[in-house]
Amino acid sequence: MVLGLVNHERYVLLPDRLFDGKGNFLSKPAVVVEGKRIVDITTRGSVDVGEQSKVIELKGVTLLPGLVDAHVHFTGLRTYNPAEIAVVPQDLRVLRAAQDAQKALLSGFTTLRDCGGTIALSLRRAIAEGTVPGPRILASGRPICQTGGHCDTHYMPLEDVIKRGSALLCDGPWECRKAARIALRDGADFIKVMTSGGVGSEKDDPRHPQMSVEEVKAVAEEAHRVGKKVASHAQGAEGVKIAILGGVDTIEHGYFLDEESIELMKERGVCYVPTLCLVEVYRKTLENPPPGIPEWRLKKQEECIEYMPQSFRAAYRAGVKIATGTDYYGPPLRAFGSHADEPIVMVKYGMNPVDALTASTKNAAECLGLSNVGIVDKGMVADLVGVLGDPETDIETLRNVVFVMKEGFVVLRR
């Protein structure tokens, strides 16, 4: 097993099968990588190995594009206790987050989008400069939220929430516009807004809308004018509609969708990140509540479980573009390195395995605005993952990662 970054000028990868991210499987292919790019995809019989090539035989392996998790949070937290963020030192949480990044990469996820938090901004830079190993990170930094909204820490005095700066609280279009500019000043790759209540916030309801269309429009205008996308936490149908009418690019969660919100997503090309694997997380925490988890949170989880699969199936049947995202942030059952939970659960609740693979590769990359990853093709960045077995017939094989390459560097080989 190789663990770390190993580079050779030219690789010839010989798996049993290849999934190209576009819905196609190839048998006995040869994938040629030079530097950071894929330069050729051919058959074993016609590949030009050459003296300078490093040949890697991947017997029994299906090669895939690097997988993408479009919704995580690098928090460095390890429990469900709301007090942990206050009592665990920030530097320790940063070190834990660096460990989480490596776990994600070794599980075959070469790109992650952090949907709210400050740690990811610096972690993104540390990975890019080679200080620590990890996946490619897109980070939103501090999310934008109305006063009393999902990201407002309700159990703390308002002045303390503002001082801590974990979210950009704003009310009215002009405050929201300024908050968007502050997020961009912080270095956000995209902007995250909150247009509904949520499960992890005590004093609101996931079905209730937050922010106005005008407030969301102000944020979207600022983001789009500099080529950045906007993602919205939106669990209730009204919050989804507000987000879409305001011009967001992705809907996160969408637990309580209705026909109108689904039609709006499809009509406007908005990507849906259902974080469906949380159905299983919620069930398990209800059966055996982990230490520190508040009663109000368990109650909200129970209310959501019935509707989450229904919304997912309805959006899938309607042809909405769906991308994988786990909403994992570190504690048990939501640990980094378990990102394959999402496509696996998608198949469990009715998605075709090929569509689940596409949601984890091409769709997710497009959802993030990335055009150079997500598919295996000439000229694309060489993010490649090998799993032992055939995920088309057994999606669980996504857990059996035996080979990871990121940008032409071999990170893992078993």
Image: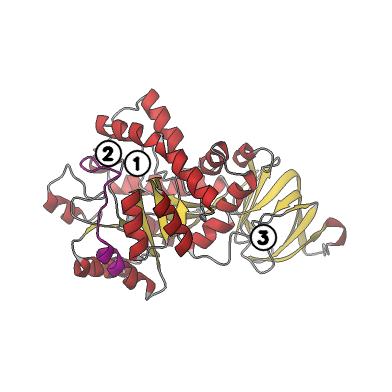
Q: Residues within 10 Å of mark 3 (few under 14, many from 20)?
A: many
- SS at badge 3: loop
Whether label 3 touches label 1, CB < 8 Å: no
Report how far apart the C-alphas of labels 3 and 2 lie in the structure: 41 Å
Disc 1 marks a residue whose amino acid type is Leu
Residue that badge 2 annotates: 84
- Of marks 3 and 2, which one's residue comes earlier in the chain? 2
- Position above or below: 349 against 361: above
x%, y% of residue 141? 33, 59
Report how far apart the C-alphas of labels 3 and 1 lie in the structure: 35 Å
x%, y% of residue 97? 40, 47
Q: Which residues are magenta?
A: 201-219
Residue that badge 3 annotates: 376
x%, y% of residue 21? 64, 56
Quadrant of the drawing holding the C terminus: top right
Quadrant of the drawing holding the N terminus: top right
- Looking at the rendered structure, the number of numbered marks drawn on it comes to 3
Residue that badge 1 annotates: 77
Determine which of the numbered discs, if any, sits on residue 325 in the image: none
Q: Is residue 20 visible?
A: yes
- Of marks 3 and 1, which one's residue comes earlier in the chain? 1
Q: Residue at x 51, y 47 (%)?
A: 104
Disc 2 marks a residue whose amino acid type is Glu
Disc 3 marks a residue whose amino acid type is Val
Q: Is residue 79 visible?
A: no
Quarter residue 395 falls in: top right
- Position above or below: 46 against 257: below
